[in-house]
Amino acid sequence: MTDSTAKLEIGGKEMELNVRPGSVGPSVVDIAALYKETGMFTYDPGFTSTASCESKITYIDGDEGVLLHRGYPIDQLAEHGDFLEVCYLLLYGELPTKVQKEDFDYRVTRHTMLHEQMSRFFTGFRRDAHPMAVMCGVVGALSAFYHDSTDISDPHQRMVASMRMIAKMPTIAAMAYKYHIGQPFIYPKNELSYAANFLHMCFAVPCEDYKANPVLARAMDRIFILHADHEQNASTSTVRLAGSSGANPFACIAAGIACLWGPAHGGANEAALNMLAEIGTVDRIPEFIERAKDKNDPFRLMGFGHRVYKNYDPRAKIMQRTTHEVLAELGVKDDPLLEVAMELEKIALTDEYFIEKKLYPNIDFYSGITLKAMGFPTTMFTVLFALARTVGWIAQWKEMIEDPHQKIGRPRQLYTGEQSRDYVPIAKR
Ligand code: SDX
């Protein structure tokens, strides 16, 4: 991988810019010196053509519909691995040996309990608060309870904070759910796997024994794998920007949760299921397809389209298979929402508009149907996304902090406002 150069001529002045190739995917033109050399900025408000950082964690080939985590294809990881193995891979860069995996699982399992004082934190919220609002509050408050892992300059504290986040997010998410439905909190159980423990904390009640259905636990674990990391998406970029100022990791993750909540991002799984319910029956699909194509109608097909994927989101294919597995295990024969989803996908993928704009189902299109069948309310869908994405946020945050060239992120702007003018006393306005 050798660098090359690009020539840029601005205002009669020629400038040579360094071009750096990636190990795979697009090269980058290094414009860091552009402003100093030309007094000009580049302009790319949605970052459609802008690399914000160098990373070795995840790579997406949007045209081919490929997703690699440290080089391993998502379909192989989802098929053969488990979520904590993917967490280890994202954090350390290699698949763990048997001994490393056992040690990692042990360490995560022993960090799943939350400081008992934090359980009172939930009682400050209304029961009908959206669980994502609770997640923003409670995760942001973690730094008020775990002072011994907020010094980001200490590698040991960075790792402890990372383990605490990965381990405690299922406990916090389950507590947010239990609080929402008025049931008592259920403590984690160390003998359970990560996904089974989460299902147990969500669906067990003190009055009877609960054993997670192994098929559902496996599906939950796979859903976590599919949501673990995804390059520099909006919420990951939020976590990196927050972390670049030196903010503690808990606060950075809370910022990521807030960004993920938006319906254009992680909130799309909740919005997609609500959309399928609004469509209701197959015969109403054409009406909604037309609305999605109408420039004057803000309606968009939730769960469709992607900034990077201009082909089928590989996660959506695995998600669709998981949906059928879960519905079969639960004996759900003809789920009306699934019927609408399958027909909607079929129609959209043959429609000129969607073909021309390369709009395919993304991970959020099928996840809602699966999670609803598993017993989660729609308000919990993005909470589960945040739970899984925490390892990606943490891995990207760690990579940024450990980058010797890292500096605070501070974008510039194209200013088109008023030029300097004098104050006018109110009597003269
Ligand atoms: C996630 O970045 C990530 O990696 C995110 C994510 C992750 O794992 O972190 O993959 C998770 O957020 C998946 C995306 C979930 N969001 C949705 O499903 C919401 C619906 N999708 C759209 O809002 C949209 O597709 C985005 C936000 C996902 C992508 O938006 P872009 O890249 O800014 O694309 P765009 O809005 O510029 O759309 C391009 C064209 C537009 O038409 P024109 O202005 O060119 O005429 O496609 C149209 C859009 O109007 N379009 C859609 C559409 N998505 C895009 N039209 C109808 N329905 C849609 N869903």
Image (spheres, rainbow, N blue to C red):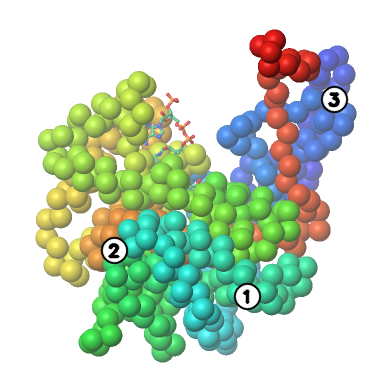
Q: Which mark sits nearer the N-terminus, 1 or 2?
A: 1
- Residue 350 pos. (x, y %): 27, 33
Mark 3 highlights which residue? 38
Mark 2 highlights which residue? 376
Looking at the rendered structure, the kind of residue marked 3 is: Thr
Which quarter is ligand 1 in?
Answer: top left
Q: State if disc 1 and disc 3 touch (CB < 8 Å).
A: no
CB of mark 2 near ligand 1 (< 8 Å): no
Left or right: residue 160 versus residue 15 is: left
- Distance from Cα at disc 2 to Cα at disc 3: 55 Å
- Residue 311 pos. (x, y %): 42, 41
Q: Secondary structure at mark 1?
A: loop
Residue depicted at x 69% and y 77%: 148
Residue depicted at x 35% and y 50%: 269
Looking at the rendered structure, the kind of residue marked 2 is: Phe
Looking at the rendered structure, the kind of residue marked 1 is: Tyr
Q: Which mark sits nearer the N-terminus, 2 or 3?
A: 3
